Image (cartoon, coloured by chain):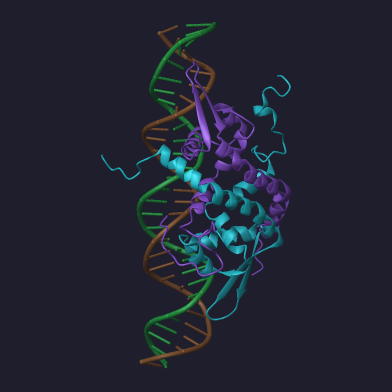
Chain colours: A cyan, B purple, C green, D brown
Amino acid sequence: MGAGTFGAMSGFGPGDPFLADCPARLAVELIADKWTVVVLYGLSKGPVRHGELIELIGGISRKMLTQTLRRLSAHGLVRRHAYVEVPPRVEYELTPLGATLIEPIHMLTEWARANGDAVLDALDAADPEPVAHSD
Amino acid sequence: MGAGTFGAMSGFGPGDPFLADCPARLAVELIADKWTVVVLYGLSKGPVRHGELIELIGGISRKMLTQTLRRLSAHGLVRRHAYVEVPPRVEYELTPLGATLIEPIHMLTEWARANGDAVLDALDAADPEPVAHSD
DNA sequence: CAGGCTAGGTTTCCGACAGGAACCAGCAGG
DNA sequence: CCTGCTGGTTCCTGTCGGAAACCTAGCCTG
């Protein structure tokens, strides 16, 4: 094959986070979750309690919040601090490793803030009537 | 997902991609998919065929690839080129809007490449063996 | 003293979705 | 004639997400 003429497949090497056997794929799939990015973003401002996250995020169930936080904790991105009080108080905070994830996530959310409108506009143009129930 | 009108109380403003009613949340949930990031990354080098993506990604089924590409196409991030040939040839490429997503995704994958090892290490430390019951 | 409250977590049930495999279309070649 | 190549769709099933109820455990209130 020519040099650089067909650049579609030539650019991917064993270090690319694209191939199935690359460890980066695992990390990408780690955060490629419905709630992971939102939860991490919610923790970016400092320690937050369980109930605070529930109300803050809006739409997540207790089960999914606990599950997501447990997974992040298991991956070393979040630290759980359970105070032995009554009523029980549990705070979650980012670990230094988790804090490094805030940067790319922030870029992602910045992109969303800048282009979310264009995405919704394209979605509206592609599917103009999602309300039409003219069956 | 019911985007209820929950009142946010902390330092998150109405423009934050964190609240349920923020359009950026929609965009974040758009890419918070198991395959979306990987597919977009696969398209970042130029037009790619359907079968090429299948082999390149490794692990994705035809259905999920088509579904993911259709969704990205509906959101204006990907453009589909179907050549009327035999055997049929279909190429997908990023739109300019989709190309702007490559930057944050690249940051994400760079983070994954840099910290994926630490994540796996923390995962290994947190769950070394499920038979260790010191309790 | 009994019952309810708070706050985090878990369990159960159910609906939706991801995923695999088989099938379809349409022409070329053995 | 029958198979194969390529992209896509449909069917079936396993798994996952979501809602609500239940649990713990101390304190407050009646």
Q: Residue at x 69, y 28 (%)?
A: A10
The location of residue C7, given as percent across then percent down, is: 51, 74
Q: Residue at x 73, y 48 (%)?
A: B114
In this orientation, which residue lies closer to the viewer: B68 or A89? B68
The location of residue A35, given as percent across then percent down, is: 53, 55
Quadrant including the N terminus of chain B: bottom left
Based on the displayed image, in which of its 4 quarters is residue B35 positioned?
A: top right
Res. A39 visible in picture:
yes
In this orientation, which residue lies closer to the viewer: B92 or B132? B92
On screen, D15 above or below C2? Answer: above
Quadrant including the C terminus of chain B: bottom right
In this orientation, which residue lies closer to the viewer: C17 or B77? B77
Viewed as shown, does residue A72 lie left or right of A59?
right
Q: Residue at x 55, y 57 (%)?
A: A38
In this orientation, which residue lies closer to the viewer: A106 or B84? A106
Viewed as shown, does residue C7 lie left or right of A8?
left
The location of residue A39, given as percent across then percent down, is: 56, 59
On screen, C4 above or below A42? Answer: below
On screen, A46 above or below B22? Answer: below
Q: Residue at x 67, y 41 (%)?
A: A17
